[in-house]
Image: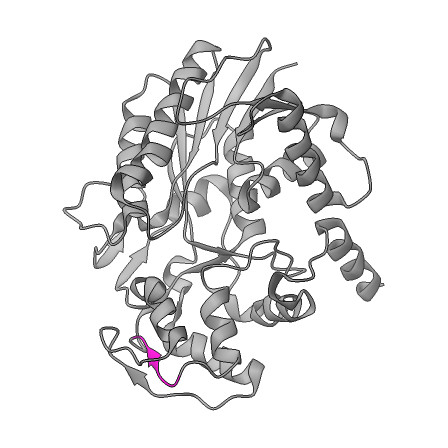
Amino acid sequence: MKRVLLTGATGFLGMEVLARLLERTDREVLCLVRARDHAAAEQRLDGVFSTLYGDAPRYRSRVCAMPGDLTSHVTPPDADVDVVCHCAASIAFDLELEEAREINVDGTKTMLALAEEVGARRFVHVSTAYVAGEHAGTFSEDMLDAGQTSRTTSEQSKWEAEHLVREAGLEWAIARPSIVMGESDTGWTPAFNVLYWPLRAFARGLFAHVPARPDGRVDVVPVDYVADGISKLIETQETGTFHLVSGAEAATVDELAEMACSFFGRPRPPYVETRTLGDSAAEEHGAVYLPYFDMDVVFDDARTRERLGLQAPPLRGYFGTLLRYAETARWGKRGNSRQEAHERLATAAG
């Protein structure tokens, strides 16, 4: 059987892609896992299955772990590989550029070489919509070089990695998600980072001001929508770049603030310029996220809607679900498996 070779399965988005391959197809999956040997790689993969399915041993026989490190040569598997899906990356905002390049650029180069070595038919690469950098106005799916300046080393290294994919001699598709949060139906997530942090700080009253422009756009999407898009790119023959974003329907900072104030029952604090921070540790720590609350870009997702038949749900429809799960999970201190979250939803619906 032709297999999928997947990187990033130990991460939030990668494990959702893995779940779709197991639940919706009969494919076998090879997961490249950073580990010293095969036993350690399988142990890490067992942890992924525990996060997804709890104690249920479902699907485990169809998945095999490959130990390896993206920053060095990876020994090719002794198995047929149909598609390589490269989800692994660093999304840290504070890495030095060379460190970000080692993971995101050199890692992509390693996987492209591996895909060619094993004779893979197709390469699906997960990038970010924020390769748009400081571009203002519409950023289309065909755009990459628009004279933009990157805000972070993550954006810059992802932009460079996309060039490698486009220049490779493989059939390729690039997925560009925006800010990824929990599942839209259950709120489930094992990772409470990016937008969760400022929302939790706001709930605790740690922001005396909102250091953002009220008309800035915050493009948020649920992980189920993004994983659906990536799994479609694995299973279809569609090529090109696909924005997995809210696009023209993205919320503004003011709309997000209104939703948060309504949910937490807090008054809306005043806005200040993003360059103006208070003295609180929360505002100082939150400064790393400020570029994503001060954006004029609109991501066009016409190709995704037309070719993949997907459109992101509006944030307002599942915002409360995200935060109710976050509170139930105590913002990551008491998490549940994905299976448990789905079972609770089914029980509530029944």
| Residue 275 in the image, given as x and y percentages of width and height | 22, 73
Task: Report whether residue 314 is seen.
Answer: yes
| Residue 277 in the image, given as x and y percentages of width and height | 28, 77
Determine the residue positioned at 37% across, 34% down.
103
Determine the residue positioned at 34% across, 88% down.
270
Could you tell me which quadrant the N terminus lies in?
top right
The residue sitting at the bottom extreme is 267
Determine the residue positioned at 33% across, 28% down.
106
Could you tell me which quadrant the C terminus lies in?
bottom right
Side of 214 relative to 137 (left or right): right
Side of 207 relative to 131 (left or right): right
Residue 112 highlighted magenta (yes or no):
no
Query: In the rendered view, would you say 105 is above or below 339?
Result: above
Side of 197 relative to 294 (left or right): right
Nearer to us in this view, 131 or 266:
266
Q: Looking at the rendering, which quadrant does residue 90 occupy?
A: top left
- Magenta span covers which residues? 208-212
Q: Main secondary structure of the magenta part?
A: loop
Query: In the rendered view, would you say 89 is above or below 199?
Result: above
Side of 116 relative to 68 (left or right): left
Determine the residue positioned at 25% across, 64% down.
296
Q: Looking at the rendering, which quadrant does residue 73 occupy?
A: top left
| Residue 230 in the image, given as x and y percentages of width and height | 51, 38
Query: In the rendered view, would you say 343 is above or below 46?
Result: below
